[in-house]
Image: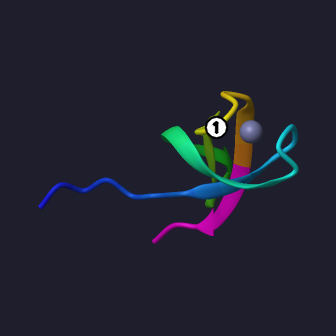
Amino acid sequence: MAEEKKYTARCMRCKTNRDVKDPELVEIRKGVWAVKGKCAVCGCKVYKIVGKKK
Ligand SMILES: [Zn+2]
């Protein structure tokens, strides 16, 4: 089973939630994770805090 998680984030340019292309998990603070990627529609950078990871 391929483990490809889908994320959505609010795109500033589209002003709506879009699928995140090339999502990358980054730890922005200890125990706090965010997803960085690109808007699947316009290619703009999107960013979303996904919370704590176990
Ligand atoms: Zn967009």
Residue 50 vs 14, above or below: the answer is below
Q: In which quarter of the image is residue 49?
A: bottom right
Please give the name of the residue rendered at 54% of the width and 57% of the height, measured from the top-left corner. Answer: 7
Residue 52 located within the stretch drawn in magenta: yes
Is the C-beta of the residue carrying label 1 under 8 Å from the nearest atom of ligand 1? yes
Residue 48, how many percent across, how many down? 71, 53
Q: Is the magenta stretch mostly helix, strand or loop?
A: strand
Which residue is most to the left? 1
The residue stretch that appears in magenta: 48-54
The amino acid at mark 1 is Val
Q: Can residue 34 be seen in this view?
A: yes
Residue 35 vs 6, above or below: the answer is above
Q: Is residue 19 left or right of residue 45?
A: left
Q: Quadrant of the C terminus?
A: bottom left
Please give the name of the residue rendered at 31% of the width and 53% of the height, measured from the top-left corner. Answer: 4
Residue 1 vs 54, above or below: the answer is above
Residue 18, how many percent across, how many down? 66, 52
Q: Quadrant of residue 44?
A: top right
